[in-house]
Amino acid sequence: MNQHPSELRKLRDNPELVSSAVSEIIRYQTPIAHMRRNAATDIVVGGKQIRKGDKVVMWYISGNRDEEVIESADRFLIDRKNVRQHLSFGFGIHRCLGRHLAELQLKILWEEVLNARLEVEVVGEPDRIASNFVHGYSALPVQIRA
Ligand code: HEM
């Protein structure tokens, strides 16, 4: 939100966008970058031959920026249409079991930030987790003002 002040303004002007903003945050960040599957059968996907037993990496972080599915995918827009149509929670039978809890936690966090009129300013670079799996931060210095 610090990097996208116009989106924060939209949210402050219209707090009903909070659920939509949470989905966009989760899409844009893509906290889990990928998962892997073992192919159960021979199949062609996107013109590529995959053989039974092949290990296939599904880059959610790439799918979430697919311009063929998501308009202006590189932009952070909290009021985009089809905002929940992202891959951050995976897809299919193993889709994240905790997704509703994760969304609820972020929704409550943002509701409280908005209700208490807190200004959260990022004042330094994040410490990134050194991983190609978890796309996250271990620390982010901020100043919080009421
Ligand atoms: C923003 C937060 C979260 C993200 C981005 C996330 C992402 C994911 C992803 C990508 C998968 C793999 C889906 C697949 O293999 O197709 C997954 C699976 C799973 N997640 Fe989450 N998750 C989050 C929060 C949570 C929370 C809070 C819980 C539990 C309270 C949870 C529990 C699980 C479980 C149990 C699975 C395994 C489901 C299965 O294999 O059938 N997740 N999650």
Image (cartoon, grey):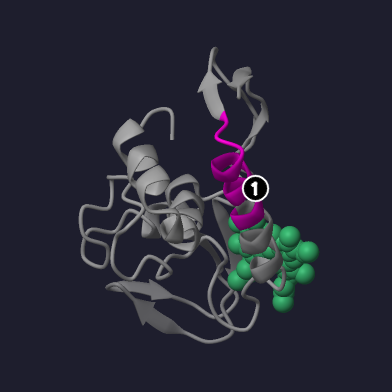
In the image: residue 140, left or right of residue 88: right
Q: Is mark 1 within 8 Å of ligand 1?
A: no
Image vertical order of residue 145 relative to residue 36, above or below: above
Residue extent of the magenta highlight: 107-118
Q: Which residue: 48% across, 56% down? A: 18
Where in the figure is residue 9, as x and y percent of width and height? 35, 39
Q: Name which residue lies at 58% across and 44% down.
A: 115
Amino acid carrying label 1: it is Leu
Q: What residue would you read off at disc 1?
A: 109
- The main secondary structure of the magenta stretch is helix
Q: Quadrant of residue 64?
A: bottom left
Q: Secondary structure at mark 1?
A: helix
- Is residue 114 inside the magenta stretch? yes
| Mark 1 surroundings within 10 Å by alpha-carbon count, few (fewer than 14), some (14 through 19), many (20 or more) | some
Q: Quadrant of the C terminus?
A: top right
Q: Is residue 44 above or below residue 133?
A: below
User: Which image quarter holds the N terminus?
Assistant: top left
Residue 72 x/y as whole percent = 21, 52
* Residue 44 picture quarter: bottom left
Q: Is residue 23 magenta?
A: no
Q: Is residue 7 left or right of residue 115?
A: left
Measuring from the top left, give residue 67's x and y in whole percent. Answer: 22, 58
